[in-house]
Image (tube, rainbow, N blue to C red):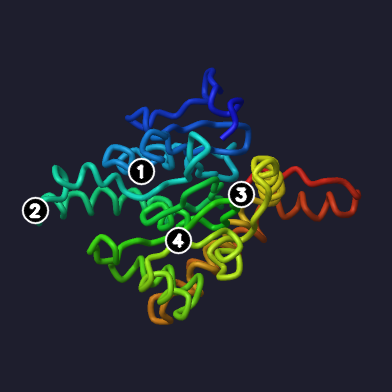
């Protein structure tokens, strides 16, 4: 995470998450979610889980934000997992564990349900709950030297079905078995081969690559991107759970939009289109 991004301030740029351990920033068309717990390698505490929906709701409602990027502060980790130091107080009995799961589920669910495209910018450790967060995003780009793992089998933790299903949907059952059964750490090259990440780049190129991707996505028609994201999400559901009418409505909205007219006009005039998301 660059110092320039971390030091951003000013009207309209800071988004309150309710905790200093999770930062929200508006940066042009990019909404940044920054896990800011570097002394614990950005392990996610309960207040951080609770802050995620607050920030994402602001980004979702702001038409100027076209892409959401999630990353970690400190240069050593994206997210190293859940903050296990809280487990004694927050997950020591079934009732507390149920509340913890509710809050953490709301946080991870907010990422998965985000209608705008999301990118995980990974530098360092991406472990356990951190990998689950990354897998909830649409695109994952990592710096060389990053490491990935789900160490549940070393901790005696159980992973619920939705989390496993997401993992299987991305890497397939064979790699999912290897990840879960061995609980070992995978290097970036292995993660790329398995499909855990989309791209692996030198650390010096990471932020530029993220901004380039965000710029490409942000310059495209928001309604088209939204419809595509919706269709992809529905395609990986069981057939009886797919909401095809909602997808068709999103597609129809594209053809009825001013952006569609702008796209055609820009093509004929041989200039870049200026999409407004309507």
* Quadrant of the rendering where the N terminus is positioned: top right
Res 229 → quadrant: bottom right
Compute the Cα span from label 2 to label 1: 21 Å
The correct choice, above or below, for 37 with respect to 160 in the image is: above
Mark nearer the N terminus (1 vs 4): 1
Query: At numbered mark 3, what does the secondary structure look like: helix, strand or loop?
Result: strand
Query: At numbered mark 1, what does the secondary structure look like: helix, strand or loop?
Result: loop
Compute the Cα span from label 3 to label 4: 15 Å
Mark nearer the N terminus (1 vs 3): 1
Residue 93 tag number: 2
Query: At numbered mark 4, what does the secondary structure look like: helix, strand or loop?
Result: loop
Read off the residue under disc 3.
143
The residue shown at (38%, 35%) is 37
Read off the residue under disc 4.
185
Res 140 → quadrant: bottom right
Please identify the residue farthest to the top as the structure is shown: 10
Compute the Cα span from label 1 to label 3: 19 Å
């Amino acid at each position: 995470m660059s110092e320039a991004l971390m030091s951003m301030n000013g009207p309209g740029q800071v988004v309150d998450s309710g905790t200093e351990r999770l930062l929200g920033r508006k940066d042009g068309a990019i909404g940044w979610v920054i896990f800011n717990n570097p002394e614990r390698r950005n392990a996610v505490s309960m207040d951080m889980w609770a802050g995620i929906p607050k920030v994402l709701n602001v980004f979702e409602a702001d038409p100027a934000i076209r892409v959401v990027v999630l990353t970690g502060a400190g240069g050593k980790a994206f997210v190293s997992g859940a903050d296990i130091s809280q487990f004694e107080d927050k997950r020591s009995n079934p009732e507390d564990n149920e509340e913890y799961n509710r809050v953490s589920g709301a946080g991870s669910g907010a990422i998965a349900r985000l209608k705008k495209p999301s990118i995980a910018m990974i530098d360092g450790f991406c472990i356990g709950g951190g990998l689950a967060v990354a897998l909830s995003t649409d695109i994952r780009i990592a710096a060389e030297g990053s490491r990935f793992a789900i160490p549940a089998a070393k901790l005696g933790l159980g992973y619920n079905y939705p989390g496993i299903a997401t993992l299987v949907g991305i890497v397939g059952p064979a790699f999912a078995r290897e990840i879960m059964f061995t609980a070992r750490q995978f290097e970036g090259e292995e993660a790329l081969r398995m499909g855990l990440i989309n791209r692996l780049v030198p650390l010096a190129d990471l932020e530029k690559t993220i901004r380039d991707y965000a710029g490409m996505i942000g310059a495209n028609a928001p309604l088209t991107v939204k419809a595509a994201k919706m269709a992809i999400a529905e395609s990986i559901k069981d057939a009886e759970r797919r909401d095809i009418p909602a997808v068709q409505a999103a597609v129809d909205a594209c053809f009825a939009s001013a952006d569609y007219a702008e796209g055609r006009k820009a093509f004929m005039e041989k200039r870049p289109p200026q999409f407004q998301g309507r």
